[in-house]
């Protein structure tokens, strides 16, 4: 039985052997970055896979790797540590969720390109200022500050589908210790990944023809994440923060690009 025949049986028709290996390589890269700084997996997967696959297949491809790796990230130090992080950032989680659900109702009203440009500009500016030492970090997570940032992140995320960069910007400005920052991101994105999976089981994006492809990307994503985690364990807080800001800068620039070409 040839490789092409096996692929034809279990994976989307748009894939051949070469493209499948490219997809695996992209999943490893996405996992590596996520293991190092805790985010950007969906951005890397959807951007890379969309180069040779239809957007719907690319979206389906990221769902299971994102779901599995976020669970691993949230629980890396155990369930008790994850629960403590949930309690510490409960205001952020609750307020962000409320505003996300509220703003999702206006997805047809606000121009997506405008919101991507606004978000991209804010994230890019924040990352540049922090990298050059020109921004004043948030010294204390007061309820008012936490709720305000959560509201902004949730409101933007509701109609753009993107709440990661504002979340990372807040945690970085707060100077969150790297292990806790990774846990909190895993919890937040993990809950989002559950919602994404449920939503696209209903939308038809995740179906019998696309689920095997998404599942096939899980092992390379885990491999990349393991490598990234090993690197993250070896770097100090300053280097972790700088690496996070660099990836955040790339994410912001990508948001700007998407907004300008829509």
Image (cartoon, rainbow, N blue to C red):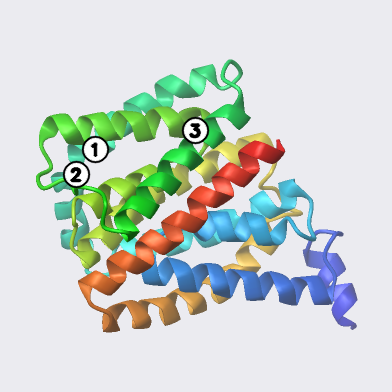
Contact check, label 2 and label 3, Cβ < 8 Å: no
Q: Are marks 2 and 1 in contact (CB under 8 Å)?
A: yes
Q: Residues within 10 Å of mark 1 (few under 14, many from 20)?
A: many
- In the shown orientation, is residue 34 left or right of residue 217? left
- When the figure is inspected, residue 106 is found, relative to residue 160, above or below; the finding is above
The secondary structure type at the circle numbered 1 is helix
Q: Nearer the viewer, mark 2 or mark 3?
A: 3
110, above or below 165, in the image: above
Q: Quadrant of residue 153?
A: top left
Q: Residues within 10 Å of mark 2 (few under 14, many from 20)?
A: some
The answer for how far apart the CA atoms under marks 2 and 1 are is 5 Å
Secondary element under disc 3, as helix, strand or loop, is: helix
Q: Residue at x 69, y 63 (%)?
A: 213
Q: Is residue 169 left or right of residue 145?
A: right
Q: Is residue 160 left or right of residue 247?
A: right
The residue labelled by disc 3 is 118
Q: Nearer the viewer, mark 3 or mark 1?
A: 3
Nearer to me, 223 or 258: 258
Whether residue 105 is visible to the viewer of this picture, yes or no, is yes
Q: Which residue is mark 1?
A: 92
Q: Nearer the viewer, residue 192 or 103?
A: 103
- Residue 131 position within the rendered picture, expressed as x and y whole percent measured from the top left: 33, 60
Residue highlighted by disc 2? 89
Q: Residue at x 62, y 68 (%)?
A: 217
Residue 5's spot in the image, x, y percent? Answer: 89, 74
- Label drawn at residue 106: none
Image label count: 3
User: Depth check: 260 or 59 in front?
Assistant: 260
What is the C-alpha distance between the residues marked 2 and 3? 26 Å
Q: Residue 178, how many percent across, how many down?
A: 23, 66
- Say if 136 sits above or below 178 in the image: above
Q: Position of residue 119 (x, y in %)?
A: 47, 37
């Amino acid at each position: 039985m040839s490789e092409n025949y096996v692929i034809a049986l279990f994976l989307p028709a748009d894939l051949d052997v070469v493209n499948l290996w490219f997809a695996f390589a992209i999943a490893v890269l996405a996992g590596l970055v996520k293991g190092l700084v805790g985010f950007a997996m969906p951005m890397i997967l959807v951007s890379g896979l969309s180069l040779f696959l239809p957007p719907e297949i690319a979206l389906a491809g990221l769902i299971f790797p994102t779901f599995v790796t976020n669970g691993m990230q949230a629980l890396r130090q155990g369930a008790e540590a994850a629960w403590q992080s949930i309690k510490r950032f409960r205001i952020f989680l609750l307020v962000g969720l409320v505003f996300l659900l509220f703003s999702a109702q206006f997805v047809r009203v606000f121009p997506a390109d405008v919101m991507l440009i606004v978000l991209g500009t804010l994230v890019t500016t924040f990352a540049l200022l922090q990298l050059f030492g020109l921004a004043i970090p948030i010294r204390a997570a007061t309820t008012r500050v936490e709720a305000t940032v959560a509201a902004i992140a949730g409101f933007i995320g509701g109609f753009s589908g993107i709440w990661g960069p504002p979340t990372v910007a807040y945690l970085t400005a707060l100077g969150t210790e790297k292990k806790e920052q990774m846990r909190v991101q895993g919890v937040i994105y993990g809950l989002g990944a559950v919602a994404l999976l449920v939503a696209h089981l209903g939308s038809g994006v995740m179906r019998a023809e696309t689920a095997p492809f998404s599942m096939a990307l899980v092992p390379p994503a885990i491999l990349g994440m393991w490598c990234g985690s090993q690197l993250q364990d070896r770097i100090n807080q300053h280097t972790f923060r700088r690496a996070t800001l660099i990836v955040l800068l790339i994410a912001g620039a990508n948001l700007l690009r998407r907004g300008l070409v829509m």
